[in-house]
Amino acid sequence: MNKITFIGLGNMGTPMAKNLLKAGLQVEVFDLNPNATLELTEMGATSASSLQQAVIGADVVITMLPAGQHVQSVYLGPNGVLESAEEGTLLIDSSTIDPATARQVATQANEHGLAFVDAPVSGGVAGAGAGTLTFIVGGSDESFAQARDILQHMGKNIFHAGDAGSGQVAKICNNMMLGILMSGTCEALNLGIDNGLDPKVLSDIMLQSSGRNWALELYNPCPNVMETAPASNGYQGGFMTQLMAKDLGLAMEAAVASHSSTPMGSVARNLFNIHSSQGNGNKDFSSLFEFYQQQSKG
Ligand code: NAD
């Protein structure tokens, strides 16, 4: 393989591209913000001055962009990836976006003789740095096999969810469940505290009872119950509230399109949206616990 082009060198893209360089691969980087690529060029990546230049001659193009509209413009826009890539190039989009856009890009990519997979990730910035991300891939068997060879340098678990768009569907189902579980965990802990319980004691009880879940086990939202959780570090680091609100919005869009009933997801979306709009968008999503505490005080 000659050249991997990485587009979108933000919080996630930078550590992911670093892991490709560490694996000895030739990486070219492009970001709208030229400063975003400096760390990588210092490590040996080449930097392109335009999207078109970045894509020409690439064997693989990986994108890690904020949202669906950015993916649409980078792939489908003038001088974009589909116009510039040579036939046979493998395209991997790891952004978290709506499944409909992922399917649209996949269809148009195939019409240009290009293989496309959606490959959103779970594991956050820490997982990106450690090379332990989970990739959830949508695409044909053949494209998945090709993509896996590259993704293994950035992640530990690589799942094939189904056809194009399925990676995004699986990712938003998981995050909708996470949002619901985190809301429920905050709610139960707050109720216990309001009724005189020690949150550590209540957490230990629920961990050995039927309320046990991932948030309680690894990510307790109440400060000072679990030393390693963002809650015990001022809700810094971790997974930002605004990103959880975004993912719950994507889940609701998907639910509308498929006529699925998602009342719990809808409540979770409202909770995280309100919490985010009250100035908590950059805090870890477990800070929703503070929202419950404020309601109790009010
Ligand atoms: P970010 O905002 O830090 O980075 C996005 C980068 O894309 C920026 O550097 C921006 O300049 C660049 N960009 C935007 N439009 C562009 C364009 N047209 N051409 C080239 N570059 C462009 O975002 P992030 O935190 O790295 O997240 C990226 C994606 O990963 C999002 O879809 C997010 O939902 C998903 N995600 C993030 C996390 C996390 O913890 N940060 C975890 C899992 C998934």
Image: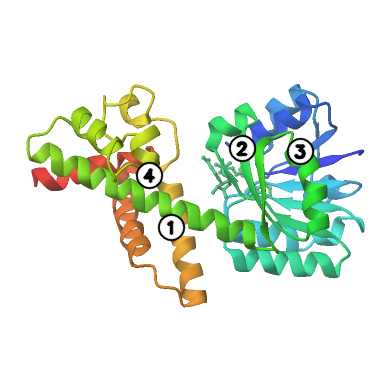
Q: Earlier in the sequence, mark 2 or mark 3?
A: 3
Between the residue at mark 3 and the residue at mark 1, the CA separation in whole angstroms equals: 30 Å
Residue at which label 1 appears: 248
Q: Quadrant of residue 143?
A: bottom right
- Secondary structure under the numbered disc 3 in the rendered image: strand
x 83%, y 26%: residue: 24
Comparing labels 2 and 1, the label whose residue is closer to the camera: 2
Mark 3, other Cα within 10 Å: few <14 / some 14–19 / many ≥20: many
Q: Which residue is mark 2?
A: 133
Q: Position of residue 147 (x, y in %)?
A: 78, 47
Front: mark 1 or 4: 1
**Residue 200: percent from the left, percent from the top?**
22, 28
Query: Badge 4: few (under 14), some or many (20 or more) residues near its Cα, within 10 Å?
Result: many
Residue 163 placement (x, y as % from top left): 70, 64
Q: Nearer the viewer, mark 3 or mark 1?
A: 1
Distance CA(mark 1)–CA(mark 4): 14 Å
Task: Let me know if residue 143 appears in the view.
Answer: yes
Mark sitting on residue 208: none
- Residue behind mark 3: 29
Tell whether label 4 touches label 3 (CB within 8 Å): no
First in sequence: mark 2 vs mark 4: 2
- Amino acid at circle 3: Val
Tag 2 near tag 1, CB within 8 Å? no
Mark 2 Cα-neighbour bin, 10 Å: few <14, some 14–19, many ≥20: many
SS at mark 1 in the image? helix
Q: Secondary structure at mark 2?
A: strand
- Residue 296 placement, left or right of 31: left
Q: Which element is circle 4 on?
A: loop
Of the two numbered discs 3 and 1 on the same chain, state the one appearing first in sequence.
3
Q: Amino acid at mark 4?
A: Gly
**Residue beneath disc 4:** 281
Q: Reading the chain from its start, which is encountered first: label 3 or label 4? A: 3
